[in-house]
Amino acid sequence: MLKRWIVQAGIGLMLLGGGFSAAIASAQTPTEQAVSSYVNVTLPAIAQMKPYIDKSAPERAKAFATMGLTDAMCAAAVTDAIAAREHFAEGAGNLCGAMIAWMQNEDIYTCSRVKFSGIDFAHTEPVNAEIAKRHKADNILDTRLRLQKSADCEGKTVTYWGPSVDAHPGARCFSEKFSA
């Protein structure tokens, strides 16, 4: 009986040790996770949507419905980039979110994320070599500028945004709550 318990405990410890070593082996640094998200999530999503930047809203919506992309995928990649302080990856994640919004004809979110991506791309500190290489090779800056132009983000001023925000379904509730 004691011998069987010792054998079972030994097997349990081996399995536990194997689980720990697998967890340690698969653990990534924040930079490795940011690179992985950038290469495996952000860039493919941007590439998938890129041909539709200059298309009409109905064409974008129809194409987007077949892509299987979600808003959360870009947000997760941005979180990974922030944790690693990889601004190019963060900016590309914001661009990804802007493109998803544009595919759904949501210009307020599109233009805000385009602006955030520009701020991220302006950082000059060292960038992970893989991110820098892919950023240039995939022409991410040009994609950002194309989206900015197509969505007319530069031409949309307070005169445009004020009524757009007021027309948003949640705006009335928000303004009533904070105007009292």
Image: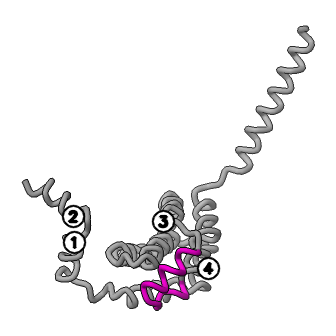
Q: Is residue 64 visible?
A: yes
Quarter where residue 127 is shown? bottom right
| Lower position in the chain sequence, tag 2 or tag 4 | 4
Q: Which mark is residue 134?
A: 4
Q: Residue at x 80, y 38 (%)?
A: 18
Residue under label 1: 167
Of marks 3 and 4, the one in the foreground? 3
Q: How many marks?
A: 4
- Residue lying at the far left in this picture: please name it: 180
Question: The disc labelled 1 sits on which kind of residue?
Answer: Ala
Q: CA distance from mark 2 to mark 4?
A: 40 Å
Question: The disc labelled 2 sits on which kind of residue?
Answer: Ala
Quadrant the N terminus occupies: top right
| Lower position in the chain sequence, tag 3 or tag 2 | 3
Q: Which mark is residue 171?
A: 2
| Lower position in the chain sequence, tag 1 or tag 4 | 4
Q: Residue at x 46, y 76 (%)?
A: 95
Where does the magenta region start and end? 50-66
Q: CA distance from mark 3 to mark 2?
A: 22 Å
Taking depth in this image into account, of 160 and 29 the one nearest to the observer is: 160
Which secondary structure lies at badge 1?
helix
Q: Position of residue 45 (x, y in %)?
A: 57, 74
Which secondary structure lies at badge 2?
helix
Residue under label 3: 71
